Amino acid sequence: MAAALVIVVPHGGSLRPDYINDRKTNDPTYCPSGGCRVSADSYTKQIAEQIASKFIQNYCKVPYLIINELHRSKMDANREKEEAAFGNAIAESAWTKFHEYINEAQTHIQTEFDTVYNEASIEGVRGLVFDVHGYAGTDWHNEGSDFIQWGYRLGKDSLDQNAVNNCPIDITSSSTRGSFTHARQMPDESLECLVRGPKSLGQRFNDQLPLSLASSMTCGRGLPSLDYQDPKAVASDPTYCADNDGVCSYYSGGYDVKVHERMDWDNDPTFSGIHMNTVQAELPRCIRFATDETRNAVHEEFADKLSIALCSFMTDLFGSDIC
């Protein structure tokens, strides 16, 4: 049986075919002002496969797993098509297929698990899209941050608890701002609680720490979560941030979680159709790389604990048949 979960890995591939030209970091035609990224998110493919395996082991249900096997230097599946493929027809076709496969998985979940209307009469699929990434965190202390950066399409300023009228987040977030555009208005739910409350994904994982073989007792702590509610405050705190400018990077969610928040992913800019809740997770080096001796064991333990966090989160939203 299927689980109502789509695991997406846009930057975990390793294939570098010669017939697709390399993407460049500073191409003036395709790159934004900050440049293009071409480095892979190492070990995210292997970790996603472990998460799927643990779902099968723990719940006897199989999540959908969509992996871009092309290296990011050939195609970036988490960008608009132009930046993703640099005009290469084969890369463009691969980009389209990647997103169509995600949507196909979402459609299967809709068929099997149905939809539900929230209190704002928004129809949403009973399931979750989970987008797996990795970040170096070289601007943080300890050779890279040990935070899992949870991305909801809300930047540091949107999550700033010191800003006027920014807490709870729901005050300033419209029905189309950020992710969880459907779940935030389910009965007894709010965006504030879903993103950084006691039952948020970040906190559910925090509650299972430590990872026994990780390099630190805090490896995998969630940002945001109930324990670490304000990414801007944490990223500006010299206790954590080593950046010369005093503000470290926080990844709030990219193209995948934006467009697949709606079922008509390539033709619904107003979010007027059926929704499906999405979330991005940026995994730190202490989980992805660990050490040569502990890497496989850390991946397995992380995947086990994350499968528990994801299943409990989805069950609380949609019922026990979800996973």
Image (spheres, grey):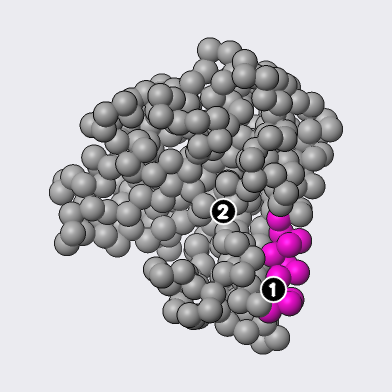
Q: Is residue 95 magenta-colored?
A: yes
Q: Residues within 10 Å of mark 2 (few under 14, many from 20)?
A: few
What residue span does the magenta drawing correspond to?
A: 88-99
**Residue 170 location (% of width, % of height):** 44, 25
- Quadrant occupied by the N terminus: top right
Label placed on residue 255: 2
Instruction: Name, please, the residue furthest toward the right.
Output: 111
Q: Quadrant of residue 148?
A: top left
Q: Amino acid at mark 1?
A: Ala
Asked whether 143 or 135 is in front, the reply is 135
Q: Amino acid at mark 2?
A: Tyr
The dominant secondary structure in magenta is helix
Q: Quadrant of residue 74?
A: bottom right
**Residue 54 location (% of width, % of height):** 63, 40
Identified at 57% across, 69% down, the residue is 83
Q: Which residue is mark 1?
A: 91
From the viewer's perspective, tell me whether residue 138 is left or right of residue 91.
left
Identified at 52% across, 52% down, the residue is 254
**Residue 58 location (% of width, % of height):** 65, 32
